Image: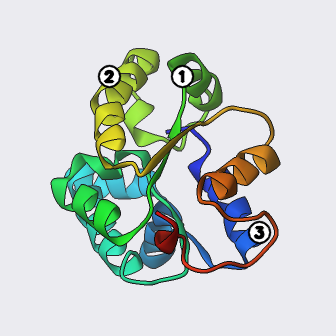
Amino acid sequence: MGAGKTTIGRTVARQLGRPFFDTDHEIESRCGVRITTIFELEGEDGFRRRETRVLDELTQRSGIVLATGGGIVLRPENREMLRARGHVIYLDAALPDLWRRVRRNRNRPLLQVDNPRARLEALFCERDPLYREIAHLIMPAHAGTVAQAAANVLALLGLPADTPAQDPATHD
């Protein structure tokens, strides 16, 4: 949450000339409501079921760049899909950076609690090892500009910037 997955992913997709998808945006588009509303009506479990269905569909496509919601790694089946069907890059961020980026955002239902900073820390402690478990590559999340981060992703994949390329999965 707040690492820059969507922003960096969108830039990488543009540079590769590929379609970009964000699981959270897909869920909102398909449901016609914001994620906060889904959480209010269905709870986190209902949202996570929707998230798994969208992930299953999107990870069966090839040639896309996909950003996921931060909690997608909580379900074992999601971790399996991500690891087996794609090339997972974990944007490794420090807690103070994440807090600075999300502290004023009211569209993050999991942080609408009495102590959002403590909640963010708990989420980070739960999710970080899961991302590390499935990541093919790990890179710093907040190193430079978005353009520099996107260039780092492409370099890690062995792809030149601004050049449409083969499926990154072939560059393991």
Residue under the point 28% across and 40% down: 130
> Amino acid under label 3?
Gln
Q: Distance between the residues labelled 3 and 1?
A: 27 Å
Location of residue 77 by image quarter? bottom left
Q: Name the residue under label 1.
A: 94
Q: Nearer the viewer, residue 5 or 100?
A: 5
- Above or below, 42 against 97 in this view is below
Q: Which of marks 1 and 2 is nearer the N terminus?
A: 1
Question: What colour scheme governs how the chains and residues are painted in the rendered image of this protein?
Answer: rainbow
Q: Nearer the viewer, mark 3 or mark 1?
A: 3
Judged from the image, the secondary structure of the residue bearing numbered disc 2 is helix
Residue 21 placement (x, y as % from top left): 55, 71
Residue under the point 41% across and 56% down: 37
Q: In this view, does 151 lie to the left or right of 24?
A: right
> Amino acid under label 2?
Ala
Q: Which of 136 and 10 is in front in this view?
A: 136
Residue 106 placement (x, y as % from top left): 55, 37
Q: Distance between the residues labelled 1 and 2?
A: 13 Å
Location of residue 120 by image quarter? top left
| Badge 3 density bin: few <14, some 14–19, many ≥20, Cα 10 Å | some
Q: In this view, does 156 lie to the left or right of 120?
A: right
Q: Is residue 164 left or right of residue 156?
A: right
Q: Which of marks 1 and 2 is in front?
A: 1
Q: Which of marks 3 and 1 is nearer the N terminus?
A: 3
| Badge 1 density bin: few <14, some 14–19, many ≥20, Cα 10 Å | few
| Badge 2 density bin: few <14, some 14–19, many ≥20, Cα 10 Å | few
Q: Name the residue under label 2.
A: 122
User: How many numbered marks, from 0 up?
Assistant: 3
> Amino acid under label 1?
Ala
Q: Mark 3 points at which residue?
A: 15
